[in-house]
Image (cartoon, rainbow, N blue to C red):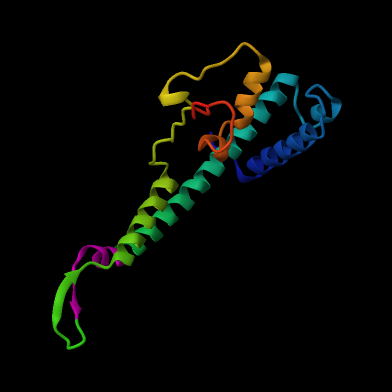
């Protein structure tokens, strides 16, 4: 049976107070939480989980609405830029003669940026995999000392070390 608005408001108020108390570090079996109307520690715990789940569901719904609005905006912009990016237009010389037909490269760049934004917004791009490897793509040679491992972790990603301009692990200059 559906709850009345008054009942839903009461539940929301109780849950807000429960969350406030838990954030303050109050234990589930504390009298302050029992005073909210929870009979047992388990009831309070389950209601907190329900409150947090409801909040996540509401956030997800809001994010979905936002994503839809952004997709619609991108659709409008893409619709405007697409013909310029795909339809060759005449190019005139100083005398007014047509010398070529070309697409608008700025429009192509705009379309690509819009497509990239859509892919990011909707999570369409595959995650980038990074792999650290040793010389010639092989295994990273590790010694038996913690100092060597620490040195390797410290210099990993250091542009100077990666290009071979300073000595360190991974420097395969043959020196």
Does the magenta portion include 89?
Answer: yes
For the magenta stretch, what is the residue range?
80-92
> Residue 64, relative to residue 73: is it above or below?
above
Give the residue at x 19% y 82%: 93
Q: Nearer the viewer, residue 166 or 58?
A: 166
User: Horizontally, is 93 left or right of 79 in the view?
Assistant: left
Does the magenta portion include 94?
Answer: no
User: Horizontally, is 119 left or right of 65 in the view?
Assistant: left
Give the residue at x 36% y 62%: 110
Q: Position of residue 170 (x, y in %)?
A: 53, 27
Q: Nearer the viewer, residue 54 or 167?
A: 167
Give the residue at x 39% y 36%: 126
User: Horizontally, is 123 left or right of 159 in the view?
Assistant: left
Q: Position of residue 113 (x, y in %)?
A: 38, 56
> Residue 80, relative to residue 117: is it above or below?
below
Q: Nearer the viewer, residue 142 or 165?
A: 165
Give the residue furthest to the bottom.
Answer: 95
Q: Position of residue 94 (x, y in %)?
A: 21, 86
């Amino acid at each position: 049976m559906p709850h009345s608005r008054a009942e839903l408001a009461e539940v929301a108020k109780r849950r807000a107070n429960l969350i406030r108390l838990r954030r303050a570090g109050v234990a589930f079996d504390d009298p302050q939480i029992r005073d909210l109307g929870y009979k047992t520690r388990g009831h309070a715990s389950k209601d907190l989980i329900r409150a947090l789940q409801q909040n996540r569901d509401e956030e997800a719904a809001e994010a979905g609405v936002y994503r839809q609005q952004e997709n619609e905006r991108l659709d409008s912009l893409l619709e405007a830029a697409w013909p310029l990016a795909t339809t060759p237009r005449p190019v005139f010389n100083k005398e007014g003669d047509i010398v070529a037909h070309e697409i608008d490269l700025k429009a192509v760049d705009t379309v690509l940026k819009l497509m990239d934004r859509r892919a990011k917004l909707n999570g369409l791009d595959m995650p980038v995999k990074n792999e650290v490897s040793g010389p010639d793509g092989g295994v990273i040679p590790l010694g038996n000392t913690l100092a060597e491992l620490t040195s390797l972790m410290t210099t990993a990603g250091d542009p100077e070390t990666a290009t071979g301009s300073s000595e360190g692990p991974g420097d395969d200059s043959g020196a």
